[in-house]
Image: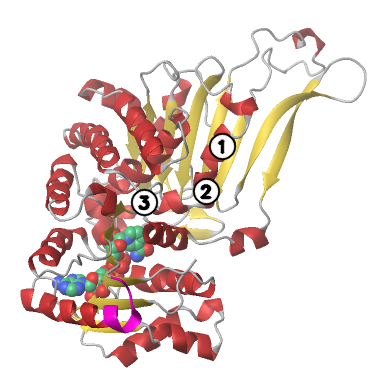
Amino acid sequence: MEQAALFTIFGGTGDLAKRKLYPSLFRLYKKGNLTKHFAVIGTARRPWSDDHYREIVRETIQDLAPTEEEAQEFSNHFYYLSHNVNDTEHYDQLKDLADELDEKYDLQGNRIYYLAMAPQFFGTIVSHLKSQEILTTTGYNRLVIEKPFGFDYDSANELNNEIRDVFPEQDIFRIDHYLGKEMIQNISVIRFANNIFESLWNNRYIENVQITFSEALGVEDRGGYYEHSGALKDMVQNHILQVVALLAMEVPTSFSNKSIREEKVKVLQAIRRYNPEEVLQNFVRGQYDAGTLDGKDFVAYHDEPNVAEDSLMETFVAGKFMIDNFRWSGVPFYIRTGKRMTEKGTRINIVFKQVPVNVFSSEQEDVSSEEELPQNILTIYIQPTEGFSLTLNGKRIGQGFTTEPVKLDFRQSAEVTENSPEAYEKLLLDALNGDGTNFSHWDEVANSWEIVDRIRNTWDQTTPGFPNYASGTMGPQCAFDLLAKNGHEWAWQP
Ligand code: NAD
Protein backbone atom coordinates (compact mmCIF):
# COMPACT_ATOMS: atom_id res chain seq x y z
CA MET A 1 0.00 0.00 0.00
CA GLU A 2 1.26 3.48 -0.76
CA GLN A 3 2.66 5.47 2.14
CA ALA A 4 2.96 9.24 2.27
CA ALA A 5 6.04 10.50 4.09
CA LEU A 6 8.96 12.87 4.07
CA PHE A 7 12.32 11.29 4.86
CA THR A 8 15.01 13.56 6.20
CA ILE A 9 18.32 11.79 6.07
CA PHE A 10 21.04 13.31 8.22
CA GLY A 11 24.32 12.10 6.71
CA GLY A 12 22.89 11.96 3.19
CA THR A 13 26.32 11.85 1.53
CA GLY A 14 27.61 9.04 3.76
CA ASP A 15 28.41 5.42 3.12
CA LEU A 16 25.29 4.00 4.76
CA ALA A 17 22.95 6.31 2.87
CA LYS A 18 24.53 5.45 -0.47
CA ARG A 19 25.04 1.73 0.02
CA LYS A 20 21.85 0.86 1.88
CA LEU A 21 19.26 3.59 2.24
CA TYR A 22 18.85 4.84 -1.33
CA PRO A 23 18.74 1.35 -2.89
CA SER A 24 16.23 0.28 -0.22
CA LEU A 25 14.03 3.29 -0.87
CA PHE A 26 14.16 2.47 -4.56
CA ARG A 27 13.04 -1.09 -3.90
CA LEU A 28 10.09 0.25 -1.93
CA TYR A 29 9.37 2.57 -4.83
CA LYS A 30 9.42 -0.32 -7.31
CA LYS A 31 7.06 -2.29 -5.11
CA GLY A 32 4.61 0.58 -4.83
CA ASN A 33 5.09 1.31 -1.13
CA LEU A 34 6.38 4.71 -2.18
CA THR A 35 4.96 6.24 -5.33
CA LYS A 36 3.90 9.84 -5.74
CA HIS A 37 3.55 11.02 -2.18
CA PHE A 38 7.04 10.89 -0.83
CA ALA A 39 10.12 13.08 -0.75
CA VAL A 40 13.62 12.77 0.63
CA ILE A 41 15.77 15.55 2.00
CA GLY A 42 19.42 14.60 2.18
CA THR A 43 21.53 16.73 4.45
CA ALA A 44 25.28 16.83 5.05
CA ARG A 45 27.99 19.44 5.17
CA ARG A 46 29.06 19.36 1.53
CA PRO A 47 27.65 22.07 -0.73
CA TRP A 48 25.84 19.90 -3.28
CA SER A 49 23.08 20.96 -5.66
CA ASP A 50 19.83 19.01 -6.02
CA ASP A 51 20.99 17.95 -9.47
CA HIS A 52 24.25 16.57 -8.22
CA TYR A 53 22.52 14.80 -5.35
CA ARG A 54 20.04 13.19 -7.74
CA GLU A 55 22.85 12.02 -9.93
CA ILE A 56 24.50 10.35 -6.92
CA VAL A 57 21.20 8.76 -5.93
CA ARG A 58 20.81 7.37 -9.47
CA GLU A 59 24.31 5.92 -9.29
CA THR A 60 23.50 4.11 -6.06
CA ILE A 61 20.57 2.28 -7.64
CA GLN A 62 22.34 1.20 -10.84
CA ASP A 63 22.72 -2.38 -9.64
CA LEU A 64 18.95 -2.64 -9.42
CA ALA A 65 18.72 -2.03 -13.17
CA PRO A 66 16.13 0.75 -13.27
CA THR A 67 14.91 2.08 -16.59
CA GLU A 68 16.09 5.59 -17.42
CA GLU A 69 12.61 6.91 -16.76
CA GLU A 70 12.23 5.14 -13.42
CA ALA A 71 15.61 6.36 -12.20
CA GLN A 72 14.72 9.89 -13.24
CA GLU A 73 11.27 9.89 -11.68
CA PHE A 74 12.52 8.32 -8.46
CA SER A 75 15.46 10.68 -8.05
CA ASN A 76 13.28 13.72 -8.70
CA HIS A 77 11.83 13.15 -5.24
CA PHE A 78 15.26 13.87 -3.68
CA TYR A 79 16.34 17.31 -2.40
CA TYR A 80 19.64 18.32 -0.93
CA LEU A 81 20.34 20.76 1.86
CA SER A 82 23.85 21.68 2.91
CA HIS A 83 23.57 21.57 6.64
CA ASN A 84 25.90 21.63 9.60
CA VAL A 85 24.10 19.87 12.42
CA ASN A 86 25.54 22.27 14.98
CA ASP A 87 24.22 25.37 13.21
CA THR A 88 20.77 26.42 14.40
CA GLU A 89 20.10 28.58 11.33
CA HIS A 90 20.36 25.55 9.07
CA TYR A 91 17.44 23.97 10.88
CA ASP A 92 15.28 26.93 9.94
CA GLN A 93 16.09 26.29 6.27
CA LEU A 94 15.30 22.65 6.83
CA LYS A 95 11.93 23.54 8.28
CA ASP A 96 11.06 25.72 5.29
CA LEU A 97 12.06 23.06 2.81
CA ALA A 98 10.22 20.32 4.72
CA ASP A 99 7.02 22.37 4.86
CA GLU A 100 7.28 23.21 1.17
CA LEU A 101 7.74 19.54 0.19
CA ASP A 102 4.95 18.51 2.49
CA GLU A 103 2.58 20.70 0.53
CA LYS A 104 4.00 19.86 -2.88
CA TYR A 105 3.73 16.08 -2.41
CA ASP A 106 0.75 16.09 -0.04
CA LEU A 107 2.68 14.27 2.71
CA GLN A 108 0.11 14.91 5.46
CA GLY A 109 2.75 15.94 7.97
CA ASN A 110 4.26 12.41 8.12
CA ARG A 111 7.96 12.59 8.83
CA ILE A 112 10.75 10.13 9.26
CA TYR A 113 14.07 11.50 10.50
CA TYR A 114 16.90 9.11 9.76
CA LEU A 115 20.14 9.77 11.64
CA ALA A 116 22.79 8.14 9.43
CA MET A 117 25.64 9.91 11.18
CA ALA A 118 28.15 9.40 13.94
CA PRO A 119 26.29 9.04 17.25
CA GLN A 120 27.85 12.09 18.90
CA PHE A 121 25.51 14.21 16.75
CA PHE A 122 22.26 12.44 17.67
CA GLY A 123 21.51 14.57 20.72
CA THR A 124 22.02 17.92 19.05
CA ILE A 125 19.97 16.99 15.98
CA VAL A 126 17.05 15.80 18.02
CA SER A 127 16.99 18.81 20.32
CA HIS A 128 17.04 21.13 17.28
CA LEU A 129 14.14 19.29 15.68
CA LYS A 130 12.13 20.35 18.69
CA SER A 131 13.51 23.83 19.36
CA GLN A 132 13.21 24.91 15.70
CA GLU A 133 9.69 23.47 15.51
CA ILE A 134 10.41 21.11 12.66
CA LEU A 135 8.18 18.42 14.13
CA THR A 136 4.70 18.47 12.66
CA THR A 137 1.46 18.48 14.58
CA THR A 138 -0.69 16.86 11.91
CA GLY A 139 1.00 13.55 10.92
CA TYR A 140 3.55 11.37 12.65
CA ASN A 141 7.17 12.12 13.54
CA ARG A 142 9.41 9.08 13.77
CA LEU A 143 13.09 8.90 14.55
CA VAL A 144 15.31 6.18 13.12
CA ILE A 145 18.74 5.90 14.73
CA GLU A 146 21.76 3.88 13.76
CA LYS A 147 23.99 1.97 16.11
CA PRO A 148 25.93 2.35 18.29
CA PHE A 149 23.44 3.62 20.84
CA GLY A 150 25.92 4.99 23.37
CA PHE A 151 29.28 3.47 24.27
CA ASP A 152 28.29 2.21 27.72
CA TYR A 153 25.20 2.27 29.93
CA ASP A 154 25.71 5.82 31.20
CA SER A 155 26.23 7.40 27.78
CA ALA A 156 23.34 5.41 26.31
CA ASN A 157 21.11 6.53 29.16
CA GLU A 158 22.10 10.15 28.65
CA LEU A 159 21.43 9.90 24.92
CA ASN A 160 18.14 8.22 25.58
CA ASN A 161 17.05 11.00 27.93
CA GLU A 162 17.86 13.61 25.28
CA ILE A 163 15.87 11.73 22.66
CA ARG A 164 12.95 10.88 24.90
CA ASP A 165 12.65 14.54 25.72
CA VAL A 166 11.53 14.98 22.11
CA PHE A 167 10.16 11.64 20.88
CA PRO A 168 8.02 9.13 22.80
CA GLU A 169 9.40 5.58 22.88
CA GLN A 170 6.92 4.30 20.29
CA ASP A 171 8.27 6.78 17.73
CA ILE A 172 11.93 5.82 18.25
CA PHE A 173 13.27 3.13 15.93
CA ARG A 174 16.73 2.01 17.06
CA ILE A 175 18.18 0.06 14.18
CA ASP A 176 19.80 -3.29 14.68
CA HIS A 177 19.93 -4.36 11.06
CA TYR A 178 20.29 -8.01 12.04
CA LEU A 179 16.68 -7.86 13.18
CA GLY A 180 15.73 -7.15 9.57
CA LYS A 181 17.43 -10.30 8.31
CA GLU A 182 15.23 -13.03 6.96
CA MET A 183 16.61 -15.89 9.05
CA ILE A 184 16.72 -13.90 12.27
CA GLN A 185 13.01 -13.29 11.78
CA ASN A 186 12.71 -16.97 10.98
CA ILE A 187 13.92 -17.92 14.49
CA SER A 188 10.47 -17.11 15.84
CA VAL A 189 8.74 -19.06 13.07
CA ILE A 190 10.93 -22.13 13.58
CA ARG A 191 10.22 -21.99 17.30
CA PHE A 192 6.57 -21.07 17.44
CA ALA A 193 5.20 -22.74 14.32
CA ASN A 194 6.73 -26.19 14.92
CA ASN A 195 5.50 -28.12 17.87
CA ILE A 196 8.38 -30.59 17.63
CA PHE A 197 10.75 -27.80 18.58
CA GLU A 198 8.76 -25.66 20.97
CA SER A 199 7.88 -28.64 23.14
CA LEU A 200 11.59 -29.45 23.48
CA TRP A 201 12.78 -25.87 23.81
CA ASN A 202 13.94 -25.91 27.44
CA ASN A 203 16.54 -27.21 29.87
CA ARG A 204 15.07 -30.72 29.98
CA TYR A 205 16.03 -31.39 26.36
CA ILE A 206 18.56 -28.78 25.29
CA GLU A 207 22.11 -29.16 26.50
CA ASN A 208 23.54 -25.92 25.19
CA VAL A 209 23.00 -23.22 22.60
CA GLN A 210 25.81 -21.87 20.41
CA ILE A 211 25.78 -18.64 18.47
CA THR A 212 28.61 -17.85 16.06
CA PHE A 213 29.04 -14.62 14.12
CA SER A 214 32.33 -15.06 12.29
CA GLU A 215 33.90 -12.80 9.74
CA ALA A 216 36.72 -13.66 7.37
CA LEU A 217 37.45 -9.97 6.82
CA GLY A 218 39.77 -8.01 9.05
CA VAL A 219 39.12 -4.52 10.33
CA GLU A 220 39.59 -3.06 6.80
CA ASP A 221 39.51 0.72 6.86
CA ARG A 222 37.49 0.93 10.08
CA GLY A 223 40.50 0.81 12.41
CA GLY A 224 39.74 4.25 13.85
CA TYR A 225 36.23 3.21 14.86
CA TYR A 226 37.17 -0.28 15.95
CA GLU A 227 39.91 0.90 18.30
CA HIS A 228 37.15 2.47 20.42
CA SER A 229 34.68 -0.32 20.08
CA GLY A 230 36.17 -3.80 19.76
CA ALA A 231 34.22 -6.96 19.15
CA LEU A 232 32.37 -6.84 22.46
CA LYS A 233 30.65 -3.50 21.88
CA ASP A 234 30.48 -3.84 18.11
CA MET A 235 28.71 -7.22 18.07
CA VAL A 236 27.76 -8.60 21.48
CA GLN A 237 25.96 -5.62 22.99
CA ASN A 238 23.53 -5.42 20.11
CA HIS A 239 23.25 -8.23 17.54
CA ILE A 240 24.28 -11.20 19.65
CA LEU A 241 22.23 -10.31 22.72
CA GLN A 242 19.23 -9.69 20.46
CA VAL A 243 19.63 -13.19 19.05
CA VAL A 244 19.96 -14.66 22.55
CA ALA A 245 16.72 -12.88 23.49
CA LEU A 246 14.86 -14.19 20.43
CA LEU A 247 16.06 -17.75 21.06
CA ALA A 248 15.30 -17.74 24.76
CA MET A 249 12.14 -15.65 25.11
CA GLU A 250 8.84 -17.15 26.23
CA VAL A 251 6.11 -17.55 23.65
CA PRO A 252 4.55 -14.11 23.26
CA THR A 253 0.78 -13.97 23.77
CA SER A 254 0.47 -12.54 20.27
CA PHE A 255 3.03 -11.79 17.61
CA SER A 256 2.82 -8.08 18.29
CA ASN A 257 5.44 -5.48 18.88
CA LYS A 258 4.51 -5.04 22.53
CA SER A 259 4.32 -8.72 23.50
CA ILE A 260 7.59 -9.60 21.81
CA ARG A 261 9.43 -6.72 23.38
CA GLU A 262 8.10 -7.65 26.80
CA GLU A 263 9.33 -11.21 26.43
CA LYS A 264 12.74 -10.19 25.10
CA VAL A 265 13.26 -7.79 27.97
CA LYS A 266 12.45 -10.53 30.49
CA VAL A 267 15.18 -12.72 29.02
CA LEU A 268 17.75 -9.94 29.12
CA GLN A 269 16.82 -9.26 32.74
CA ALA A 270 17.29 -12.95 33.55
CA ILE A 271 20.80 -13.14 32.06
CA ARG A 272 23.16 -13.63 34.97
CA ARG A 273 25.11 -10.52 35.92
CA TYR A 274 28.69 -11.66 36.43
CA ASN A 275 31.05 -10.34 39.07
CA PRO A 276 34.66 -9.73 37.92
CA GLU A 277 35.79 -13.21 38.84
CA GLU A 278 32.89 -14.76 36.90
CA VAL A 279 33.61 -12.54 33.91
CA LEU A 280 37.13 -13.92 33.73
CA GLN A 281 35.84 -17.47 34.02
CA ASN A 282 33.12 -17.09 31.42
CA PHE A 283 34.40 -14.62 28.82
CA VAL A 284 37.58 -14.72 26.76
CA ARG A 285 38.95 -12.35 24.16
CA GLY A 286 41.39 -12.47 21.30
CA GLN A 287 43.19 -10.34 18.77
CA TYR A 288 44.28 -11.61 15.38
CA ASP A 289 47.89 -12.05 14.43
CA ALA A 290 49.27 -12.35 10.92
CA GLY A 291 48.24 -15.51 9.12
CA THR A 292 47.39 -17.18 5.85
CA LEU A 293 43.98 -18.08 4.47
CA ASP A 294 43.29 -19.59 1.06
CA GLY A 295 46.88 -18.89 0.03
CA LYS A 296 46.67 -15.20 0.96
CA ASP A 297 48.78 -13.58 3.66
CA PHE A 298 47.19 -11.22 6.14
CA VAL A 299 48.79 -8.76 8.54
CA ALA A 300 48.21 -8.70 12.27
CA TYR A 301 45.51 -6.38 13.67
CA HIS A 302 48.11 -4.08 15.24
CA ASP A 303 49.64 -3.53 11.78
CA GLU A 304 46.34 -2.44 10.22
CA PRO A 305 45.84 1.24 9.30
CA ASN A 306 44.72 3.51 12.15
CA VAL A 307 45.41 0.86 14.78
CA ALA A 308 47.91 1.40 17.59
CA GLU A 309 50.97 -0.86 17.45
CA ASP A 310 50.43 -1.86 21.06
CA SER A 311 46.63 -2.00 20.78
CA LEU A 312 44.86 -4.06 23.45
CA MET A 313 41.54 -4.00 21.59
CA GLU A 314 39.86 -7.37 21.08
CA THR A 315 38.89 -8.55 17.61
CA PHE A 316 37.36 -11.73 19.01
CA VAL A 317 35.09 -12.59 21.94
CA ALA A 318 33.73 -15.87 23.17
CA GLY A 319 31.60 -16.29 26.24
CA LYS A 320 28.99 -18.13 28.14
CA PHE A 321 25.72 -16.52 29.19
CA MET A 322 23.50 -18.17 31.77
CA ILE A 323 19.80 -17.37 31.91
CA ASP A 324 18.41 -17.79 35.38
CA ASN A 325 14.79 -18.69 34.80
CA PHE A 326 12.72 -21.89 34.87
CA ARG A 327 13.11 -22.63 31.18
CA TRP A 328 16.86 -22.18 30.87
CA SER A 329 18.42 -22.79 34.25
CA GLY A 330 21.67 -24.76 33.71
CA VAL A 331 21.80 -24.34 29.91
CA PRO A 332 24.86 -22.42 28.69
CA PHE A 333 24.35 -20.02 25.81
CA TYR A 334 27.79 -19.90 24.20
CA ILE A 335 28.57 -17.03 21.88
CA ARG A 336 31.58 -16.18 19.75
CA THR A 337 32.35 -13.52 17.22
CA GLY A 338 35.49 -12.32 15.59
CA LYS A 339 37.33 -10.98 12.61
CA ARG A 340 39.80 -12.78 10.35
CA MET A 341 38.31 -16.13 11.16
CA THR A 342 38.33 -19.15 8.86
CA GLU A 343 35.02 -18.46 7.19
CA LYS A 344 32.29 -15.85 7.12
CA GLY A 345 29.17 -17.22 8.69
CA THR A 346 26.39 -16.50 11.13
CA ARG A 347 24.79 -19.58 12.55
CA ILE A 348 23.05 -20.91 15.58
CA ASN A 349 23.41 -24.46 16.86
CA ILE A 350 20.88 -25.85 19.29
CA VAL A 351 22.54 -28.91 20.81
CA PHE A 352 20.05 -31.39 22.28
CA LYS A 353 20.77 -33.69 25.19
CA GLN A 354 21.70 -37.29 24.65
CA VAL A 355 19.06 -39.98 24.97
CA PRO A 356 19.23 -41.26 28.58
CA VAL A 357 20.71 -44.64 27.59
CA ASN A 358 22.29 -45.70 24.30
CA VAL A 359 20.72 -49.13 23.77
CA PHE A 360 22.76 -49.53 20.58
CA SER A 361 26.18 -49.15 22.17
CA SER A 362 27.02 -52.87 21.97
CA GLU A 363 25.94 -52.93 18.32
CA GLN A 364 28.49 -50.47 17.00
CA GLU A 365 30.72 -52.05 14.34
CA ASP A 366 33.28 -49.39 14.67
CA VAL A 367 35.27 -50.35 17.75
CA SER A 368 36.61 -46.86 18.21
CA SER A 369 33.10 -45.38 18.32
CA GLU A 370 32.22 -43.84 21.61
CA GLU A 371 29.46 -45.24 23.73
CA GLU A 372 27.32 -42.13 23.42
CA LEU A 373 25.38 -41.35 20.29
CA PRO A 374 26.11 -38.12 18.42
CA GLN A 375 23.80 -35.38 19.64
CA ASN A 376 20.84 -34.06 17.71
CA ILE A 377 21.66 -30.57 16.56
CA LEU A 378 19.34 -28.02 15.03
CA THR A 379 21.36 -25.50 13.03
CA ILE A 380 19.92 -22.20 11.86
CA TYR A 381 21.96 -20.65 9.07
CA ILE A 382 21.60 -16.88 9.02
CA GLN A 383 24.23 -15.94 6.44
CA PRO A 384 25.68 -16.28 3.88
CA THR A 385 23.40 -19.25 3.21
CA GLU A 386 19.93 -19.16 4.73
CA GLY A 387 18.14 -22.21 6.01
CA PHE A 388 18.21 -24.84 8.71
CA SER A 389 19.36 -28.39 9.23
CA LEU A 390 18.76 -31.10 11.77
CA THR A 391 21.14 -33.93 12.53
CA LEU A 392 19.53 -37.18 13.63
CA ASN A 393 20.78 -40.70 14.15
CA GLY A 394 19.71 -43.38 11.68
CA LYS A 395 20.53 -47.01 11.06
CA ARG A 396 23.33 -47.87 8.72
CA ILE A 397 22.01 -50.18 6.03
CA GLY A 398 23.07 -53.79 6.59
CA GLN A 399 23.20 -56.37 9.31
CA GLY A 400 22.84 -55.35 12.94
CA PHE A 401 22.04 -51.97 14.42
CA THR A 402 24.96 -49.72 13.70
CA THR A 403 23.86 -46.12 13.96
CA GLU A 404 25.06 -43.27 11.83
CA PRO A 405 24.28 -39.56 11.84
CA VAL A 406 22.11 -38.21 9.03
CA LYS A 407 21.41 -34.60 8.26
CA LEU A 408 18.13 -33.11 7.08
CA ASP A 409 19.22 -29.97 5.34
CA PHE A 410 17.15 -27.14 3.92
CA ARG A 411 18.82 -24.13 2.32
CA GLN A 412 17.11 -21.37 0.41
CA SER A 413 18.30 -21.28 -3.17
CA ALA A 414 20.72 -18.55 -4.13
CA GLU A 415 17.99 -17.10 -6.34
CA VAL A 416 15.50 -16.77 -3.47
CA THR A 417 18.15 -15.32 -1.18
CA GLU A 418 19.21 -12.76 -3.74
CA ASN A 419 15.66 -11.66 -4.39
CA SER A 420 14.58 -11.52 -0.77
CA PRO A 421 14.16 -8.00 0.58
CA GLU A 422 17.25 -6.37 2.03
CA ALA A 423 17.25 -5.91 5.81
CA TYR A 424 17.19 -2.12 5.38
CA GLU A 425 14.28 -2.28 2.98
CA LYS A 426 12.22 -4.22 5.51
CA LEU A 427 13.19 -1.94 8.35
CA LEU A 428 12.38 1.22 6.41
CA LEU A 429 8.98 -0.21 5.56
CA ASP A 430 8.45 -1.16 9.21
CA ALA A 431 9.27 2.42 10.19
CA LEU A 432 6.77 3.70 7.60
CA ASN A 433 4.17 1.36 9.08
CA GLY A 434 5.05 2.38 12.64
CA ASP A 435 5.93 -1.21 13.52
CA GLY A 436 8.75 -1.36 16.08
CA THR A 437 8.94 -5.17 16.39
CA ASN A 438 12.28 -5.44 14.63
CA PHE A 439 13.93 -2.53 16.41
CA SER A 440 15.55 -2.35 19.85
CA HIS A 441 13.47 -0.94 22.67
CA TRP A 442 15.24 1.16 25.29
CA ASP A 443 14.76 -1.51 27.97
CA GLU A 444 16.58 -3.98 25.74
CA VAL A 445 19.42 -1.56 25.06
CA ALA A 446 19.74 -0.69 28.76
CA ASN A 447 19.90 -4.32 29.87
CA SER A 448 22.41 -5.18 27.15
CA TRP A 449 24.72 -2.39 28.22
CA GLU A 450 24.49 -3.43 31.84
CA ILE A 451 25.59 -6.94 30.89
CA VAL A 452 28.36 -5.80 28.56
CA ASP A 453 29.71 -3.04 30.84
CA ARG A 454 30.55 -5.65 33.48
CA ILE A 455 32.66 -7.57 30.99
CA ARG A 456 34.33 -4.47 29.61
CA ASN A 457 35.13 -3.04 33.04
CA THR A 458 36.72 -6.29 34.19
CA TRP A 459 38.76 -6.62 31.03
CA ASP A 460 39.98 -3.05 31.37
CA GLN A 461 41.61 -4.00 34.69
CA THR A 462 43.77 -6.72 33.14
CA THR A 463 46.30 -6.86 30.30
CA PRO A 464 45.62 -9.55 27.72
CA GLY A 465 48.41 -11.45 25.96
CA PHE A 466 47.67 -10.22 22.43
CA PRO A 467 47.83 -11.21 19.62
CA ASN A 468 46.64 -14.73 20.42
CA TYR A 469 45.15 -16.22 17.27
CA ALA A 470 46.41 -16.46 13.72
CA SER A 471 44.38 -14.90 10.93
CA GLY A 472 42.34 -17.61 9.25
CA THR A 473 41.60 -19.63 12.39
CA MET A 474 38.46 -19.91 14.52
CA GLY A 475 39.92 -17.84 17.35
CA PRO A 476 42.27 -18.40 20.29
CA GLN A 477 42.64 -21.70 22.15
CA CYS A 478 40.89 -20.22 25.20
CA ALA A 479 37.64 -20.11 23.18
CA PHE A 480 37.78 -23.89 22.78
CA ASP A 481 38.83 -24.44 26.40
CA LEU A 482 35.81 -22.41 27.53
CA LEU A 483 33.46 -25.13 26.26
CA ALA A 484 35.77 -28.06 26.98
CA LYS A 485 35.75 -27.34 30.70
CA ASN A 486 31.98 -28.02 30.66
CA GLY A 487 32.41 -31.13 28.52
CA HIS A 488 31.13 -29.32 25.39
CA GLU A 489 32.62 -28.38 22.05
CA TRP A 490 31.80 -25.99 19.23
CA ALA A 491 29.45 -27.78 16.86
CA TRP A 492 30.66 -25.64 13.96
CA GLN A 493 34.36 -26.11 13.27
CA PRO A 494 35.08 -25.18 9.67
P1 NAD B 1 29.98 8.25 6.95
O1 NAD B 1 31.17 8.80 7.64
O2 NAD B 1 30.16 7.62 5.61
O3 NAD B 1 28.89 9.39 6.76
C1 NAD B 1 28.66 10.39 7.72
C2 NAD B 1 27.78 11.48 7.16
O4 NAD B 1 27.63 12.51 8.14
C3 NAD B 1 28.32 12.16 5.91
O5 NAD B 1 27.21 12.40 5.06
C4 NAD B 1 28.89 13.48 6.44
O6 NAD B 1 28.91 14.51 5.49
C5 NAD B 1 27.91 13.78 7.53
N1 NAD B 1 28.42 14.70 8.57
C6 NAD B 1 29.50 14.55 9.37
N2 NAD B 1 29.63 15.61 10.19
C7 NAD B 1 28.60 16.45 9.94
C8 NAD B 1 28.14 17.71 10.47
N3 NAD B 1 28.79 18.32 11.48
N4 NAD B 1 27.02 18.24 9.97
C9 NAD B 1 26.35 17.63 8.98
N5 NAD B 1 26.72 16.47 8.44
C10 NAD B 1 27.83 15.88 8.89
O7 NAD B 1 29.29 7.23 7.98
P2 NAD B 1 28.37 5.97 7.65
O8 NAD B 1 29.24 4.78 7.42
O9 NAD B 1 27.37 6.32 6.62
O10 NAD B 1 27.65 5.71 9.06
C11 NAD B 1 26.61 6.52 9.57
C12 NAD B 1 26.01 5.88 10.78
O11 NAD B 1 25.51 4.59 10.44
C13 NAD B 1 26.98 5.63 11.94
O12 NAD B 1 26.27 5.78 13.14
C14 NAD B 1 27.40 4.19 11.75
O13 NAD B 1 27.80 3.59 12.97
C15 NAD B 1 26.10 3.60 11.26
N6 NAD B 1 26.25 2.36 10.49
C16 NAD B 1 26.84 2.35 9.25
C17 NAD B 1 26.91 1.18 8.53
C18 NAD B 1 27.53 1.16 7.17
O14 NAD B 1 27.38 0.12 6.50
N7 NAD B 1 28.16 2.20 6.70
C19 NAD B 1 26.40 0.00 9.05
C20 NAD B 1 25.80 0.03 10.31
C21 NAD B 1 25.72 1.22 11.01
Q: Do the residues under discs 2 and 1 have CB atoms within 8 angstroms?
A: yes
Q: Which residue is mark 3?
A: 176
- Cα–Cα span, label 2 and label 1: 10 Å
Q: Which residue is mark 1?
A: 492
Q: Amino acid at mark 1?
A: Trp
Disc 3 from disc 1: Cα separation: 25 Å
**CA neighbours of label 1 inside 10 A, class few (<14), some (14 to 19), many (20+):** few
Q: Quadrant of ligand 1?
A: bottom left
- Give the quarter of the figure containing the C terminus: top right
| Quarter where residue 84 is shown | bottom left
Q: Nearer the viewer, mark 3 or mark 1?
A: 3
- C-alpha separation, residue under disc 2 versus residue under disc 3: 18 Å
Q: Tell me if residue 80 is in the magenta stretch.
A: no
Q: Magenta segment range?
A: 101-108
Q: Earlier in the sequence, mark 2 or mark 3?
A: 3
Amino acid type, residue under disc 2 in the picture: Gly
Label 2 crowding class (10 Å Cα cut-off): few <14, some 14-19, many 20+? some
Q: Quadrant of residue 136?
A: bottom left
| Nearer-the-camera pick, 176 or 108 | 108
Mark 2, secondary structure of its residue: strand
The residue wearing badge 2 is: 345
